[in-house]
């Protein structure tokens, strides 16, 4: 049981290791594929292939040219050596001095750069060789066969060359050669000096008298060539690696890094960040700078468009908010107007119903007063009754004033409307209130600076509205206070009447209700709350509007805005 569990455990570990190794291999493969699919990867791949191809191509070309040049040099050296040997042997052969000829050949065979010189007769039989005849013998069948077929290796009548590697089993050589040899066969042609010489027995018809073969070792030359080739290939490989490294560094700096910057900026833009800009460097490629400049310009245009859209959105939001406030104000105004209209109808009916009983009470009160005066009663009895009747009369008149106010509030007729000069109506209102203001020690000022003051209005209603506002202002200020009544034209179609005081002001929570009927902040003793309601009704009846600006402890300004009649509307 324990062995089975351990086996499964190690089997699971091996499986996990294989999975991790496979996952790592897949990740590396994906990374390589991704690298190969990028511009930088493609450029590096092409540069690497091109560098290897150039390295191999130049190596092959160098090897071919070097080989041809080496063969040319070898032939030139061999030709020179052959000519030197011919010149050294010429006199000995001409005089048929065999001893001198052998001595000269022995000297030549000891010279550095010459392996040996072998001489053959016209039948290609070996007549001289530096090898000892005792050890080998010239009639060796193998050697005889080689020398017999020597014409298969060289041209018969012209100087010829052959490069061989002496790895055969030829017993004529005492050395085991591990390098190449240059074989030069120089034919000895029959010249006039030869067949006319007294010492030679050659006929004139003999064209070839013999030949000699010079063997020149190429060991030093091959070593030099091998060393130079090795150095060349090392230098070429080093140059290729340096060039490849430089090209990769250049590609990374001039292509990959700018492209990565563009990619990062694009990803930032995709995340909504349009504040990033690409750096334009003077040492960058012109194409990269053009792309960076175009990208920055695109971001500038995008930022400008975004700011413009944001500004338009803010303006639209502000306009929507303003229109919503205006609609809310208009809705409240409509509700207020509807409420005033309903109250006006109710006030009119109630006023007419109350007015008749009040008139009867007032009439009978005065009649009772007259009857009491006629009676012969003591003053102690008469005076209390007259006092009570006086109170009844005053309260009845007060109720009458309330009924009159209700009637004025409910009256909306425009039968007495005509074109009036508003300044004339305001001056008359000023004259009516001037004495009362002086009595209350209030400084009363006017400033009628409006240029156009023609309005289609009811003179009495305008006076009533202004006097009601002035009365409220006088009741709201203390002794030595100030009231200013002024006019101005906010635009060419309207005139504004401002009545400003420096009194106690109105609380902000009371301002929305001051034009409602029976609303008052002065208490039951001094007001019934119909003054400003009547003002609002009058202004509405003149197609105008009323505005209130007040601050506690600093005063109140009530503005009446009415449409004017300019010269174009008159004609």
Image: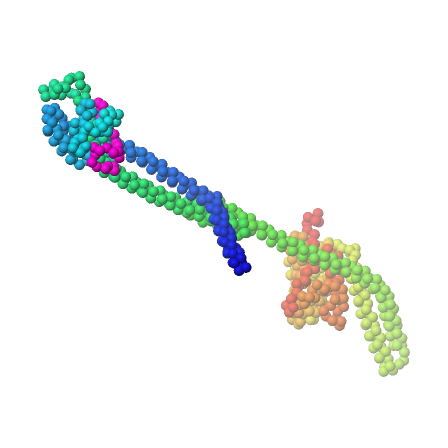
Res. 529 image quadrant: bottom right
Q: Relative to the observer, which residue lies in front, 86 or 211?
A: 211
- Horizontal side of residue 181 vs 489, given as left or right: left
Residue 44 percent coordinates (x, y): 42, 43
Residue 235 percent coordinates (x, y): 31, 42
Can residue 296 be seen by looking at this rendering? Answer: no
Res. 430 image quadrant: bottom right
Which color scheme did the rendering employ for the protein?
rainbow
Magenta highlight range: 156-179
Q: Residue at x 25, y 38 (%)?
A: 178
Against 240, residue 101 (above or below) is above
Q: Quadrant of the N terminus?
A: bottom right
Is residue 17 rendered magenta in the image? no
Q: Relative to the observer, which residue lies in front, 261 or 21?
A: 21
Q: Residue at x 82, y 67 (%)?
A: 400
Can residue 32 be seen by looking at this rendering? Answer: yes
- Horizontal side of residue 296 vs 410, given as left or right: left
Residue 438 percent coordinates (x, y): 68, 69
All told, the count of numbered labels is 0
Q: Residue at x 12, y 18 (%)?
A: 196
Against 484, residue 244 (above or below) is above
Q: Residue at x 76, y 71 (%)?
A: 524
Against 35, residue 545 (above or below) is below
- Horizontal side of residue 126 vs 514, given as left or right: left
Q: Main secondary structure of the magenta part?
A: loop
Residue extending farthest top: 205
Q: Relative to the observer, which residue lies in front, 211 or 221?
A: 211
Residue 551 percent coordinates (x, y): 65, 66
Q: Relative to the observer, which residue lies in front, 336 or 247?
A: 247
Is residue 172 rendered magenta in the image? yes
């Amino acid at each position: 049981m324990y062995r089975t569990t351990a086996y499964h455990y190690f089997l699971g570990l091996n499986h996990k290791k294989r999975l991790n190794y496979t996952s790592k291999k897949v990740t590396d493969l994906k990374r390589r594929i991704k690298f190969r699919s990028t511009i930088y990867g493609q450029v590096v791949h092409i540069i690497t292939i091109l560098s290897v191809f150039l390295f191999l191509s130049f190596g092959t070309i160098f090897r071919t040219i070097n080989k041809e040049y080496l063969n040319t040099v070898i032939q030139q050296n061999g030709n020179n050596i052959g000519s030197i040997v011919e010149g050294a042997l010429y006199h000995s052969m001409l005089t048929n001095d065999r001893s001198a000829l052998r001595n000269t050949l022995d000297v030549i065979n000891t010279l550095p750069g010459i392996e040996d010189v072998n001489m053959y007769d016209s039948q290609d039989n070996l007549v001289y060789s530096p090898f000892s005849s005792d050890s080998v013998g010239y009639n060796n069948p193998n050697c005889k066969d080689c020398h017999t077929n020597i014409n298969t290796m060289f041209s018969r009548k012209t100087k010829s060359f052959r490069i061989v590697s002496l790895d055969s089993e030829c017993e004529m050589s005492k050395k085991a050669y591990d390098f190449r040899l240059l074989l030069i066969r120089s034919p000895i042609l029959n010249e006039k000096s030869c067949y006319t010489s007294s010492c030679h027995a050659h006929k004139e018809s003999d064209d070839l008298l013999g030949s000699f073969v010079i063997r020149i070792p190429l060991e030093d030359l091959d070593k030099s060539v091998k060393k130079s080739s090795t150095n060349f290939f090392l230098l070429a490989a080093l140059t290729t690696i340096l060039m490849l490294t430089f090209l990769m560094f250049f590609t990374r700096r001039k292509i990959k890094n700018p492209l990565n910057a563009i990619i990062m900026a694009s990803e930032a833009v995709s995340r909504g960040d349009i504040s990033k800009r690409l750096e334009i460097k003077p040492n960058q490629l012109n194409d990269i700078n053009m792309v960076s400049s175009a990208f920055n310009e695109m971001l500038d245009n995008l930022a400008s468009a975004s700011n413009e859209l944001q500004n338009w959105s803010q303006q639209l939001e502000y306009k929507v908010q303003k229109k919503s406030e205006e609609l809310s104000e208009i809705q409240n105004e409509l509700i207020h107007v509807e409420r005033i209209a309903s109250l006006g109808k109710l006030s009119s009916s109630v006023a007419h119903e109350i007015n008749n009983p009040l008139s009867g009470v007032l009439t009978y009160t005065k009649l009772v007063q007259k009857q009491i005066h006629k009676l012969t009663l003591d003053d102690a009895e008469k005076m209390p009754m007259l006092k009570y009747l006086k109170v009844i009369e005053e309260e009845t008149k007060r109720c009458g004033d309330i009924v009159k106010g209700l009637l004025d509030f409910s009256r909306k007729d425009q039968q007495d409307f005509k074109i009036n000069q508003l300044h004339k109506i305001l001056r008359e209102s000023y004259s009516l209130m001037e004495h009362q203001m002086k009595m209350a020690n209030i400084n009363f000022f006017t400033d009628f600076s409006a240029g156009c003051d023609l309005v289609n209005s009811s003179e009495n209603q305008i006076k009533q509205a202004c006097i009601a506002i002035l009365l409220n202002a006088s009741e709201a200020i203390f002794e030595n206070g100030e009231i200013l009544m002024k006019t101005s034209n906010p635009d060419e179609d309207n005139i504004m009447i401002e009545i400003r005081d420096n009194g106690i002001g109105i609380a902000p929570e009371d301002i929305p209700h001051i034009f409602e009927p029976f609303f008052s902040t002065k208490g039951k003793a001094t007001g019934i709350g119909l003054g400003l309601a009547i003002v609002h009704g009058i202004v509405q009846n003149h197609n105008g509007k009323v505005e209130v600006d007040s601050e506690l402890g600093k005063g109140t300004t009530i503005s009446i805005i009415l449409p004017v009649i300019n010269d174009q509307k008159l004609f």
